[in-house]
Structure formats: C-alpha cells, structure tokens
C-alpha cells in the first residue's frame, strides 16, 4: 500500500495490465509523448514503446473506431477520449459498434475494449466542456459503464475493465486526478463487475451516488452525523450493470433515499434509480425520494455561477433534511 | 478462373432471387443489391490470401459470396431465421463470417472505414503480413470517417486497401451535385496514399489492380486506394424508383456487363461454353436449395434476444 494520486493509480493499472497481457495497447490524443493530458498515461511510452502506446490525430471517430476494429481482431485496446464532451464525436462507434457488434452479428465478434474519458464540471470550461452524461451511454445494452470515486477504486476498476471481455466506458471525473489515496501494489487486485460499494454504513437515510459525488455525499454525511442523522453512502461504481440489490438492501433498512448525481436530473441517473426503488421497495417508503443534481441550465464559465450550479455538500444536507 | 465466373453468377442469381423474395415479403428491412458490381467484389477478393481481412458496407451480399459464405446461410439470415449467419439478428446489411475473416456488413455509412484501420492495426501489431480490404461506396467519401480513417491509416502506415466502389450515386444523388472533387482517387493524394483507378466492369482489371495494391501494403508500405468505376443496375435499395437516371445510362453500363465480359474472356481463352452452362445450372440449383433451406429453417426462439449481448455478464431482463 502506498498513497498516490488518481492519475498515478490509473497509470499503474495500465502498466500492470500491459505487463500481464501483450494484447493491451493504448492510444489517444497526447497519451504517448506527453503521458496524457491529465498524466494518466505517464511512463507508458518509455516502458512499452511506440508500438503499444500511440499518439493519435485529433480524430475521435477513428480513435474509437480503430479500437473497435482492433478489439474485434484480437487486441484489447484502451482508447482515451480526452473528454466525454468530445465523445459525442465517437458516440456512433461506442454505441452503434462497440456495444452491438457481438449481438448484431450473432455472437461472432468479440469487442474487449476500454474507452477512458473524463467527465464533469468545475474547471470553468463553459457549457460544451463541462458536461456529465455518462448515464446516457449506460442507456444502451451491450456497453458497460464504470466511474470510480477513489484512487484505489480507480486502479482496481480499470484493471477489471481491461480484463473484461466486453466493451467498457471508463469515466474519470476531470477534477479528481490529483486526489490522493491509499492504493495497493498487488497486481492481482481487481473488483467485481457490477458491484456497488457501501462507502459509509448508516441507518437513517440511503445516499445513492457515484464518482465525484461520493466525496460530496461523504462530506454531507459527516456533517449530518453531528446532528445525529446517520447516512449510508452507496457508491454505485458501475452505471451498467447497475447493482440495485445493494441499494434495495440499504433502502429497506433506512426507508429513505437521496440520489446524488453531478448531471442534470431530467431523464437522468436519479430518475432511473428512483423509479426502481419506488417499484421494488414501495412498502418500505417513508418519504418521497429526493434528487440532488446539477441546475438544469448550460454550465456557465463564471466561477460563482458554476459553483452555484454544481451539487455541493450543503445541497445534499438540505435534501437529507427533507426526507428525515 | 472458372471459379471467379461461378462466384459472379451465384451473386447475380442470388440477388435476382433476393429481389423476388423481398417483393414477396420474405425478406424485410433495407436491402441493397450488388447486381452490376459483381466484378468488383469478386475480382478484388480473389486477389487476397485467406488470412487477409475483408470489411464492407451494407451492400454486402456479393462481398459475402466472394468471401466464401454459403448462399443458404446468407438467405437464412435475410429471412431472419436462427440458421442465418447472425442467427437472424443482423439481416441483409449485416452479413459476416469471422472464420473467413469477413468482418461484416456495416450499415452506418463510413463507420467501418474506422474499423478497418483497427483490424489492420491488430494484424500489423502481431507481425502478421495480412492486409485488410475495405470496400465502400462513393457515397461514403464525404463523411468524416473516410477522412479520419485514411489519415490514420497513412499516419500509422497500416496495411489497408481502401476500395471505393464508385457506382456514381450516393443513394439518389450523383456525386457531382454534392462534391466539387469527383475524381475520388485525388482525395487519397491529400493523405499521401498512392492510388489507382480501374474499370470495375472488368474482373481481371480489378484483380490486377488489387494484387498490386495488396503487394504494396503487404510489403509494409502502408495503405493504398483503389477507385473502381462500376454501376449498380438496381436502385440504392429496394423501393428506389430510379427517377434520377435515364434508361440510356443504364443500358450503356449493361452493355459492359461484368459477367458477359468475363464470359467472352473465358471463351477466347478456350473454355468451352458447356462448362459455363454447367456452372449456370449448378448456381441455379444452389440458390434454389438455399431458398428452401431458409424457408424450412426455424425462427429464433424469443429467448435468443438475451444471448450474445455480453461475454462476461448476464443481461438484466425486463
């Protein structure tokens, strides 16, 4: 165990998996010579060479599409799309191809690839560069979607994703690369696909969340604990497959839930989770389910406006107080 | 050489049968016929080695036959039967056979050009000398994937043969109405990719040009671009009224019919007419048996929808 950053944990995961399996290759914009826009591929070029770590042109369609082709033909590519906002340009490859080539061709083709990308706001990049819409990708059967909340989870989940025989969209929150945490050096440590994690046990209210909002929710839970409100914080980790069993088990204990997401609420992740809780746990419901989400406007550049729009611990605290 | 004649005849008869079966409602969805373009697929694919890959767009029946797929599996797929190449999940536009390195039949225009670069990358990475033949129509040359794919293949020196089947219309629109540069091979120049134009109605010309392109790519010199001048006798897809072109234009191309031309070549080289008649008869039987097979095959069970979505997890059912 050693304390390291999210970026280094990701680089470690890729290095270990490249060491383990020579079918793993990495490509994307600035991933080789400069070690990644956020430093997550630092050191890979030196260690594995230019045949396995490749800089691409700024061409999201073919970055993702070439990864699909290479995966079909026996490799396990990790393609980096610098930001999920640019993944709009790769969406056809990720959703129409990666997610479908196995089933649409009757099981003839494999597609074991990982698309790594960053998501989320908080960097004053204005409306087109700050979005959170990984749940849109999770809408489509055939694609797995995962978004870690800590360096330890990031390393283990990325290794799980690389070893997975299905296509995985791996979503990193853009402001978290320098967050630090304990990370194992056990190269065989991975995490199961589709299992949520209880990041904080509690008995009064269930907070369902993932990625950066796990930290926000834990901060809120710590404050609420001072007022004797005991929150259970569930980190979904995977948006598909969705581990609702862990959510239901918690809700049947607390009878109250707040869902915390960074993106907009309309047609969002919280809508899906809430609908499922209402259906499966109707008899356990003691209060309407609350949602904490981004204000439903394009995210502006101006710092105070951006701060106002994104979910904060205070928003979570207020929502919890509405349900207890 | 007779084998190449046979493949073209099988494609022609298969396509004529598909047209009939579509009109009878046996085949659904969108369907794009290859009639008129037979020499392109057969000629080019005859130049490949078995370890070379092939990928194409949705006008894929002829390419599938040239790759060695059985008409019965093709027709069963179009009927939506469990015995089809994709168990009835893909249909006319998504034929494929991984055992023959035929990577499909893809129906998002131009998207498979990106896949081709990745397929070729994987072969090159493994130090195989395999190349990838990537077919697409002139209609795909104005979409981003074409430009992104050609550029990446050139930048990474990938063994891809880009084969543009220039059949003169993107759906119903002639290229000249939507592009200023209509000599498509000139676009390859922009990416530093060598190119050649060849007569798509002449099987031996297509074969020779493809052989040259393949040896270039196989020698590690990177991608090559072929613009094959051809023509589809039928419309873009079924139901196309073809009001955008004149009967004279169609007749002009039909006068150069690829099968007729190749028949002349064979006759001149001393192949007896009877040999070709025998092949025609065998092809008719093959197609008739294929129709029967597709007709007799069972529908997929509804349980089939949950299969082959994932490798590692069970799908969540609703």
Image: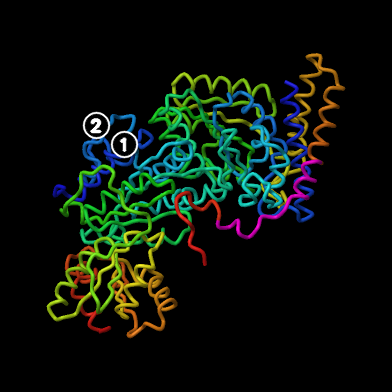
Task: Check if residue B201 falls in the magenta segment.
Answer: no
**Residue B245 image position (x, y, % from top left):** 71, 45
Residue at image x 25%, y 46%? A10
Say few, some or many: other residues with alpha carbon within 10 Å of mark 2 (under 14 / 14 to 19 / 20 or more): few
Q: Quadrant of the C terminus of chain A?
A: bottom left
**Residue B307 image position (x, y, % from top left):** 55, 54
Q: Are marks 1 and 2 on the same chain?
A: yes
Task: Check if residue B301 falls in the magenta segment.
Answer: yes
Residue at image x 68%, y 52%? B80
Q: Nearer the viewer, residue B265 or B244?
A: B265
Residue identifier under label 2: A47
- Horizontal side of residue B298 vs A161, given as left or right: right
- Horizontal side of residue B250 vs A247, given as left or right: right
Q: Nearer the viewer, residue B36 or B79?
A: B79
SS for dot 2: helix
**Residue B274 image position (x, y, % from top left):** 87, 22
Where residue A193 sits, quadrant-wise, is: bottom left
Measure the C-alpha gap from mark 1 to mark 2: 10 Å
The chain ID associated with circle 1 is A
Q: Is residue B242 above or below residue A323?
A: above
**Residue A117 image position (x, y, % from top left):** 32, 51
Q: How is the image coloured?
A: rainbow
Residue identifier under label 1: A18
SS for dot 1: helix
Sequence order check, earlier mark of 1 and 2: 1
Residue interval drawn in magenta: B289-306
Give the residue at the far left of this rendering. A226
Asked whether the beta carbons under mark 1 and mark 2 sit within 8 Å of each other, the answer is yes
Where residue A18 sits, quadrant-wise, is: top left
Q: Main secondary structure of the magenta part?
A: helix
For discs 1 and 2, the disc positioned in front in the rendered view: 1
Q: Nearer the viewer, residue A246 or A73?
A: A246
């Amino acid at each position: 165990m050693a304390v390291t950053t999210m970026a280094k944990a990701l680089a470690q995961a890729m290095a270990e998996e490249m060491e383990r399996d020579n079918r793993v290759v990495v490509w994307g914009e600035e991933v080789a010579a400069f070690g990644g826009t956020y430093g997550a591929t630092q050191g890979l070029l030196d260690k594995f060479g230019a045949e396995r770590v490749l800089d691409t042109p700024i061409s999201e369609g073919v970055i993702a599409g070439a990864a699909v082709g290479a995966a079909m033909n026996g490799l396990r590519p990790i393609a980096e799309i610098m930001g999920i906002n640019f993944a709009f340009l790769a969406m056809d490859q990720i959703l129409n191809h990666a997610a479908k080539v196995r089933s649409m061709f009757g099981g003839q083709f494999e597609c074991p690839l990982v698309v790594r990308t960053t998501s989320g706001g908080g960097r004053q990049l204005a409306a087109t560069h700050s979005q959170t819409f990984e749940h849109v990708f999770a809408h489509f059967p055939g694609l797995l979607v995962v978004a870690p909340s800590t360096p330890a989870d990031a390393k283990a989940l990325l290794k799980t994703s690389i070893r997975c025989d299905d296509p995985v969209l791996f979503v990193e929150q853009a402001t978290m690369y320098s967050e630090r945490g304990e990370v194992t050096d056990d190269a065989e440590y991975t995490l199961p696909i589709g299992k949520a994690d209880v990041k904080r046990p509690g008995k009064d209210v269930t907070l369902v969340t993932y990625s950066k909002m796990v930290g926000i929710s834990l901060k809120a839970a710590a404050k609420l604990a001072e007022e004797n409100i005991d929150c259970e914080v569930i980190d979904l980790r995977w948006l598909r497959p969705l581990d609702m069993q862990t959510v239901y088990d918690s809700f049947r204990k607390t009878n109250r839930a707040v869902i915390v997401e960074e993106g907009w609420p309309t047609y969002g992740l919280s809508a899906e989770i809430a609908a499922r809780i209402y259906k499966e746990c109707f008899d356990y419901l003691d209060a309407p389910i609350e949602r904490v989400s981004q204000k439903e406007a394009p995210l502006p550049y101006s710092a105070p406006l951006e701060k106002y729009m994104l979910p904060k611990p205070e928003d979570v605290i207020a929502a919890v107080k509405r349900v207890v | 050489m007779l084998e190449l004649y046979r493949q073209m005849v099988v494609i022609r008869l298969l396509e004529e049968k598909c047209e009939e079966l579509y009109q009878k409602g046996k085949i659904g969805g969108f369907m794009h016929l290859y009639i008129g373009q037979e020499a392109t697929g057969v000629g080019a694919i005859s130049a490949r080695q078995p370890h070379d890959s092939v990928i194409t767009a949705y006008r894929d029946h002829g390419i599938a036959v040239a790759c060695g797929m059985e008409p019965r599996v093709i027709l069963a797929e179009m009927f939506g039967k469990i015995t089809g190449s994709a168990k009835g999940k893909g249909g006319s536009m998504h034929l494929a056979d991984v055992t023959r390195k035929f990577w499909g039949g893809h129906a998002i225009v131009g998207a498979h050009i990106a896949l081709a670069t990745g397929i070729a990358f994987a072969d090159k990475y493994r130090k195989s000398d395999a190349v990838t033949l990537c077919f697409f129509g002139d209609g795909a040359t104005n979409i981003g994937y074409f430009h992104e794919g050609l550029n990446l293949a050139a930048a990474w020196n990938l063994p891809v043969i880009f084969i543009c089947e220039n059949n003169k219309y993107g759906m119903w629109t002639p290229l000249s109405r939507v592009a200023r540069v209509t000599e498509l091979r000139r676009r390859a120049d922009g990416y530093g990719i060598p190119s050649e134009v060849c007569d798509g109605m002449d099987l031996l010309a297509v074969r020779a040009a493809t052989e040259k392109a393949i040896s270039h790519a196989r020698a590690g010199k990177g991608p090559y671009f072929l613009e094959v001048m051809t023509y589809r006798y039928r419309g873009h897809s079924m139901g196309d009224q073809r009001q955008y072109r004149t009967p004279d234009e169609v007749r002009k191309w039909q006068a150069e019919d690829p099968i007729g031309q190749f028949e002349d070549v064979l006759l001149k080289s001393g192949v007896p007419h009877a040999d070709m008649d025998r092949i025609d008869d065998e092809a008719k039987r093959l197609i008739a048996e294929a129709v029967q097979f597709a007709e007799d095959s069972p529908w997929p069970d509804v349980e089939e929808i949950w299969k082959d979505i994932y490798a590692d997890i069970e799908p969540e059912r609703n």
